[in-house]
Amino acid sequence: MLTAIMLLAGCSMLQAPQVENTSTYVLDARPSHRIAAPPHDLVLAVSMPHTRPGFDTPQMAYVQQPHELNYYAVNRWVDTPAHMLAPLLTQALEQSGGFRAVVRTPGPVPADIRLDTELIRLQQDFATHPSQVEITLRAQLVDVRSQQVLAVKQFDETEAAPGENAYGGVVAANRALQRMLDQLAEFCMRASATRHASP
């Protein structure tokens, strides 16, 4: 009995291992201004962004040396970057005021032009000091009727992180993405002018 009591007392003194809480973050950047340009009477469809391997995950990526991709252990995006990016692209193009309508694909509304994008990278680089977030997005505008590629452009943005941690990377990512959304809207406006002028 004495042995059993001692074993029970020992078990009660054992503490459950502490589990670190996971922090989740969002990409919620908004375009900074409305582009002053005449609207095109075109319907623009925005397709779901594709993602390069390594970034199609809610895990937050960082690098400390070239060619080696790491992920934060207890910090994550609320969804994959592509799924967070899709509504932001649509909203930025709607707010540009340059199109009769902006829709998501697939959808029932027929479109005149389509925006296809690929997220090439979204990472925090600790090889520099302060660390910086790097975002690269490839955009392609396509004439839906003729399947002709109207324009292709790659956008690269970097932003110094205000802190050497995951949250600092999130703040920097949203600042860089805000600039990128402005540039993307302007790109779509200019490239679609070719389609608008064609018979």
Image (cartoon, grey):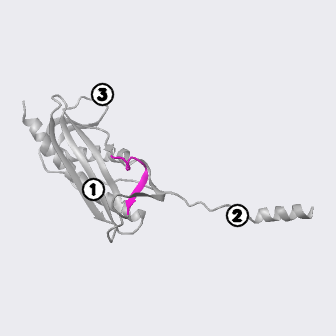
Label 2, secondary structure: give it: loop
The label on residue 15 is: 2
Residue type at mark 2?
A: Gln
Q: Are marks 2 and 3 in contact (CB under 8 Å)?
A: no
For label 2, the crowd category at 10 Å Cα-Cα, with few meaning under 14, some 14 to 19 and many 20 or more, is: few
Residue for point 33% across, 71% down: 130
- Of residues 173 and 193, the one nearer the viewer is 173
* 96, above or below 156, in the image: above
SS at circle 3: loop
Quadrant housing residue 143: top left
For the record, the magenta segment spans 52-63
- Residue 175 in the image: state x and y as whole percent: 30, 60
* Residue bearing the label numbered 1: 178
190 relative position to 6: left or right = left
Please tell me which residue lies in front, 53 or 30. Answer: 53
Q: Is residue 61 magenta?
A: yes
